Each structure stands twice: as structure tokens, then as C-alpha cells.
Image (spheres, helix red, strand yellow):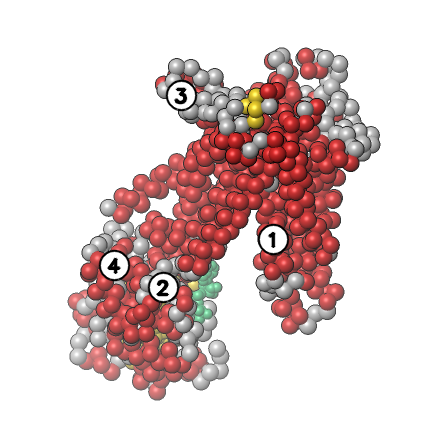
Amino acid sequence: MKYLEEKILKIIMICAAVIILAVLLFIISTVFYRGLPALSLDMVTKLPGGGFYLGKEGGVLNAIVGSIYIIVGSLVISIFISVPLVLYINFYLPAKSVFSSVIRFSLDILFGIPSIVYGAFGFSLMIYLGLRASLLGGILAVGMLIMPIMMRSFDEITRLLSRDLPDALLSLGSTKYEMAKVILRQLMPGLVTAILLAIGRGVGDAATVLFTAGYTDNIPSSLNQPAATLPLSIFFQLGSPVEEVQNRAYASAIILTVIILILSFGARYFSSKFSKNKI
Amino acid sequence: MIITSHRLQENENITFPDTKEISPLKKLINSQSIRIENLDVYIENQHILKDVNLIIPEKKITCIIGPSGCGKSTFLKTLNRMHDETPEVKISGKIFVDDENIYDNRVNIIDTRKKMGLLAQRPCPLPMSIFDNVAYGPRIHGMKKKKTINQTVIQYLQYVGLWDEVRDRVRTSATRLSIGQQQRLCLARGLAIEPEYILGDEATSALDPLSTKKIEELFVKLKEKYTIILVTHTLRQAKRIADYIIFMYLGKIIEAGPTEEFFSNPKKQLTREYLSGSFS
Amino acid sequence: MLGIAIFTILLLIIIGLSLFFKALPIMREKNLWVLLTSAQWKPFKGDFGFLPFILSTFYVSLIAIIIALPFSILTSIYLNSYASKSVKKFFEPVIDLLSGIPPIIYGVWGTLTIVPLIANKIAPKFVEFSTGYTVLAGGVVLAVMIIPLLISIMVEVFRSIPKEMIDASLSMGATKWQTVKKVILRKSISGIIAATVLALSRAFGETMAVLMVCGNITQIPHSLFDACYPLPALIANNYGEMLSMPSYESALMFSAFLLFIIVVLFNGISRFTLIQIEKRYQF
Ligand SMILES: Nc1ncnc2c1ncn2[C@@H]1O[C@H](COP(=O)(O)OP(=O)(O)OP(=O)(O)O)[C@@H](O)[C@H]1O
Ligand SMILES: [Mg+2]
């Protein structure tokens, strides 16, 4: 009886895992099947020409560059905010302080706030400040979106380490400077994982940049010009009735996925390199 | 009766004082003891246990001693087939329990484990109440009636002397007990599956002297009904409670024999060195 | 650094307050109860009933979690307790890959496959006609999206269970499944709840993927095969163009505020229940 139960459940579990695998394959193959034929060098090297959305010549370089600008900008901002904060919570505040749990709780909520809310909030903030949809607006909104993601995952890893690491080191008789060095090296993989997660969410999110970054067929040359982004570009191309343009949307989807994959595998590679020379 | 050697055929070379009563081989065939033949264990291609041949006597306490890393825990795990959970471990050889080779494909792992109550180094209560911890074994083996479960739980809690200490809070979490109480709870939990053998892997090393004493007394009481195999690091404990001693070194059985004989008159040079504490 | 710490807390308060004040005009104009329970949505006539959007959000997320939870739990258990090392190694990047795929691509996939599948194959068995852009489509796409999130958290949760505990159960002759059922799941219940809450709040707020497949028709959906219009889609579709109408803008900000409140409540409640659970069964 219990053996039968065991067997049946094992089969069900394998089925569940296989279905998930199949769905993943299905998603990727659908996108590639429709998008690959439309993928060309022009797609990644040219701006949308006149009548691009009606099926004429051009590419999505504007969106690629825009997306990269925005993610790099917002990453820089959020790294500068998250790293000190996480170190502060974990190494300066006592382990069970009320303040740190208040911070963690508000991080949890910030983490849960939907991207569309950040978008709407960012936009109303920009109107208040007299800004128009621009690269800067996109960077700020995406920055708000990914900051809690980074903080939370970085904090989680740091918390595991901070519990016993400093004691162990001090009892070994190392100086504060050496200690800081070792801790940072230990934390590096955690930080990289956090960045990786943040990039994944940030690059792919359309709802935040929908109002804040605007959309343009050109590459922005300053912070107050609007910037195109890949997810929006995909969305607009999909909205076109022309089949060719729709196929180009799938091609752009491939580009977006590949960018994210390159970024995350790069991050993974670095994190494994760092963790190799742990103490 | 303990026999150790490279091959069973060489048994004649080793004599134990009390072998006169029954011929060892004959006894092992009809008794519920454990007989191990040519046991080799490899973990990730490392040879951990090397050609172990042993007989473990029935209803006695057998202590395994030896330096850290010599394979004591590995050996215990082969007895209740816990190695089956880790694919890196390769086992060859035969272990007869009740005259049945437990590594035979026809033998059910679960039945084997049910015969062996394991007491781990550190007490590990399951994430449930004290009552449910003890009832866990009977329940998974199909006991349904509330009344019988109740009786069983109380019986075994009384047996390990825990009942009076916890009778008011058997429905509360088991993790709130002291470590010594937890270990006795784990013993009760193990006994509740009605095993024939009790395996203890340094079962008292995490405990204070008083709790240790309680557990030791329990073991002595238990040997009337059970065959007990203990791994221990304290030679004094082995001296106190063991009937037989097995000394292992680097995955090999070096020497084995009745406790008094083993301590007063060790046969091998290695054993003498170990007993005199010149290595650890 | 103290400044930054205060900044994060302030940011939360600022977001909440500014959404609140932006939503205040509409809440002044209309009774809050009417806003929440009326199904009348005619912005140009000044009727703002959010019930269709609230219900849509709720239904889509509910379906998503109902589909995703069993799959994720089963798969994570499989990966944790049954799968061989090579299977685990193989699955790790797959889950990473799935969680790296941006929502818009799930949306694309949904329009290409799930929507026609529902329109042509599934819906005809139950209703006369459906475009395929439905509650069900939104739920399925959302489910596929949150599964990797759930799995990656749950695998972590299961992994944190001490091995001795599992060994203790196995060595008493429990089968693997008995061990899973009575020890592993029990020990990780709070982790599973936390993961579910996280996934649910992601589902509530997901915009693009759902917007692309759920039809965006203002109505109270009565079956799985009706179109629906969740709150985030409402904001995304209309905000930006409707700034000329103050009450409409305020209404949209009200929906953003609603989402915000839902997330705050969710976090609060889940934290509270988790503490209760841990207190009750402090195992
Ligand atoms: N899972 C494993 N993978 C690799 N090697 C292992 C594994 N388990 C045990 N070993 C090796 O097997 C040998 C015996 O280990 P075992 O735990 O049986 O020693 P022990 O005698 O119980 O030591 P101690 O007294 O410290 O508990 C050791 O050299 C150990 O490194
Ligand atoms: Mg050991």
C-alpha cells in the first residue's frame, strides 16, 4: 500500500518536472520558430527606418541601446545605495535590533510593489518635478524597482555569513582591515547573484518604463531625452497588423532573451570565479 | 560471539574464552545475530571499509572503538542500509541478519530498517510534538487505533524514564526538551518501531554526565531484549557497559573480543598503542 | 549609512502617501465603498466602479497560484529528495533560465499558443464562443511565470532542512514519501507559505504578460472563458493619455494605490501568520 503510494507519487512528480521542462522548451521554441527567420544583422545594428512599423527596413538598435543605458544607470544607482545599507544592517546594527527589522520589513514591501505602481509613481513624481518622459526618468523608475530586489537578495546572503564570520576572524587575530577584505571577498558572489537577479527583472520589465522613459526611434544623447526599451519595442511591434513586423517582434524577443542570458551567465561566471578563491 | 579475521575459515586461529559452550559457527546459524562476510565499502572510489568479517552476538552490548575517521559510522550505516540514500557509496559483501542477507535484492530495505533502531550522535527530534515523535514509527508502520498508539507511546516513554518528566506536556514541541531528554525521546522513538537491534553512533557524546549515565543504564537494561551495537569514543564507557569490543583502524577490524580480555590482554600491537593513548 | 536606511523606509512612506494623495480626489468625489463595489465603469460620465478590475485581478492570480503551486511543490520535492545529482544539475540552469525570461516573452508565448488553444480547443467544449483572450489564458501565462520563482525558493527551503532529521525518519523505516509528507513538508510549511505570498504578490502586480492575453474588457468575469481586465492592465492601458481628465487620472492612481495596499496588507498578514505558526509549532 505505502509502496504503491510512493510509486504513484514519484511518477506524478516526474510528470510535473517533465511538464515544466516541456513548457520551457515550448516557450523558447515558439519564440525562436517565429523570430529566427526575421532575425538579421540589420535588426541589431540599425535604427528603425521610416515605415519600420509597417514592414519597411530597419532594426531595433534604439531599443537595445536604450535598454542597456537604463539598466546600467539604474544598476549603478542601486548598487551605491544597497551595498552600504546591507553592510550597515548586518555589521553595524545589533543582530536583533528593532530598527533592522523595520528596514527589512519595508524592504519586503518595496520588493512586493508591482512594477506598474513604480511606473505610475515615477511618472507622477516626474510631472511634479516638471520632467518629461526621459532616459533619466526611466533610470530612476527602474532603479526604484530593482533596488529592493538587490537589497533583499544581497541581505539574505550577507545575513548567513555575518552570523559567525567576524567572530571567527577576530578570534584568529586578524586586523580590521584584513577582516573587511575577507568579508568583501566572501560577499562578492552574493552581490553578483543579487545584481544578476536585478538585471533580469530590470531589463525585462515593460511596465516601469512605459510612462517614465517614453519611446523614440533614436538613440538618446542626453539624460532628458526619451529612450526606447526592448520590451516596449516588442510590445509595439506586436501591435502592428503587418505580419512581418510581428515576426520582427519575435526576433526582438530573441535578442532580449539572449541579452539577459549573456548578462546572467556572465554574472554566474564571475561569481564562481570569486567563490573559488574564498578563504 | 565475535569472530574476526580475513576469512571466516580462519576462525580457528582466534579463541575466545567462552567459545567452549557452543561452536561459534553453529550458533550464528541458528541465532538472531548479525553475521558480516567480506564487507567492502567504497565512497567516491575511496576504500572505506576493507574486508570486514564479523559476527555480532545476540542480546549483548558490542562496542566499536577506534580513532576518528576509521569508518565506525560508515559501518553502522551499512547495517541499516542508510547508505542506499547516497549514490556515491558502493557496497559489496554480505550481511546476514536473522540469516537473511540484507543486501539481497529480495530483501525489503524498509523491513531491514525497521529491525534496526538507530540512535544518532546528536538527538534529532522530528518537527512535531513529543507524543507524535514516539507515535511516528508505529503510525508509519500502519498502527491506526488511537488507543493502541496511546498505550505504545506511554509504554516507551515510561521505559526510557521520560514519562514522569513530560506527562503534562506530551503535546508540546519536542525541541523544547533538554538535550538529554531529547536523546531519551529519540531512544523511545526508536524502540517504538519494535526493532530487534539497537545501533548507537556516539549516542552519548553530546550529553552531560548525568544524562549519559541514564542512557547507559538504559542500554544495560535493554540488552535483555535487544542486540545492541554502539560506537563510542570513550574507552571508559566501553569498559563500563560493553560485553564485547571491536577495535577498528583505517577501515579494518584489528581486534575483537570480550571486554575484559580485550582490555587486560590485547593481542595486537596497534590495539595496545591505541589503548595506551599514544594515538588518537 | 543611517541616511540610506532611513531613506528606504521613507521611500516606502512617500510612495504610499503620494499615491494616496493622488487618489484622494476620486475618494472625495465618490464613496469609497461605491468605488470598491460598483461595477459601473464609465469614466466620461464620472462612474468609477472598480469591482470588475479588482475581481479580474483576484481571479487571474488565484488561477495562477492554483495551477502553479502543485507543480512547484511536486517538482521541488522531486528535485530535493528523489532526483539524482545529474538531474539536479540539469534543472538548476533550466529554472534560472525560466526566471530570466522577461514577462513580455511569456505574454508573446501566451498570445501565440495559449490564446488560440483556448479559443479553438478548450473553450468550445464548455461555452459557445470565446476569443481565447480570457481569465484562463491570463491565469495560465501567469502560472508559468511564477513557477520558476516558486521552485527556486522552495528548493532552498527544502535544502535547509537538516539531513539528520530526514535520516532519522528514514532509519525508522519510513518510505521517502512518508518522510516527505510528515517531516519535510511539515518542517517547511512556513517557507512554503512565504514563497506563496511572494508569488501571489508578483501575480497581483504583473502587468504586461497578463495584459496581452486577458482581453481587457471591462466586465465582471463569470467564467474562465470570459475576458477580464486586471488593475495593472487598466493603469498601463490608460495612464499617460488620460492626464487631461483629472478625475480619471485620480481614478487610475486609486488603482495603483489599491495595488499598493494589497501588497502591504499581504506582507503584513503573512508576516503575522508566519510568526504565529512558528510560535505554535516551534519545531
Ligand atoms: N559522504 C562521504 N563522502 C566522502 N567520504 C566519506 C563520506 N562519508 C564518510 N567518508 C569517509 O569515510 C571515512 C570514515 O568515515 P566515518 O564517518 O565512518 O568515520 P568515523 O569512524 O565514524 O569517525 P568519527 O569517530 O570521527 O565519527 C572517513 O575517512 C571519511 O572521510
Ligand atoms: Mg562517526
Q: CA distance from mark 2 to mark 1?
A: 31 Å
Q: Which residue is mark 2?
A: B172
For the residue carrying disc 1, how many other residues have a C-alpha within 10 Å: few (<14), some (14-19), or many (20+)?
Answer: many
Q: Chain of mark 1?
A: A
Q: Residue at point 26% right, 53% down? A: B108
Q: Amino acid at mark 2?
A: Thr
Disc 3 versus disc 2: nearer the observer:
2
Give the percent coordinates (x, y) of residue C166: 39, 57
Query: Could one spot residue C73 in this view of the protein?
Result: yes
Count of marks, rendered view = 4
Give the percent coordinates (x, y) of residue A211: 69, 29
Q: Which residue is mark 1?
A: A104
Q: Nearer the viewer, residue A168 or A37?
A: A168
Mark 2 or mark 4: name the one nearer the start of the chain.
4
Q: Chain of mark 2?
A: B
Q: Amino acid at mark 3?
A: Ile
Q: Chain of mark 3?
A: C
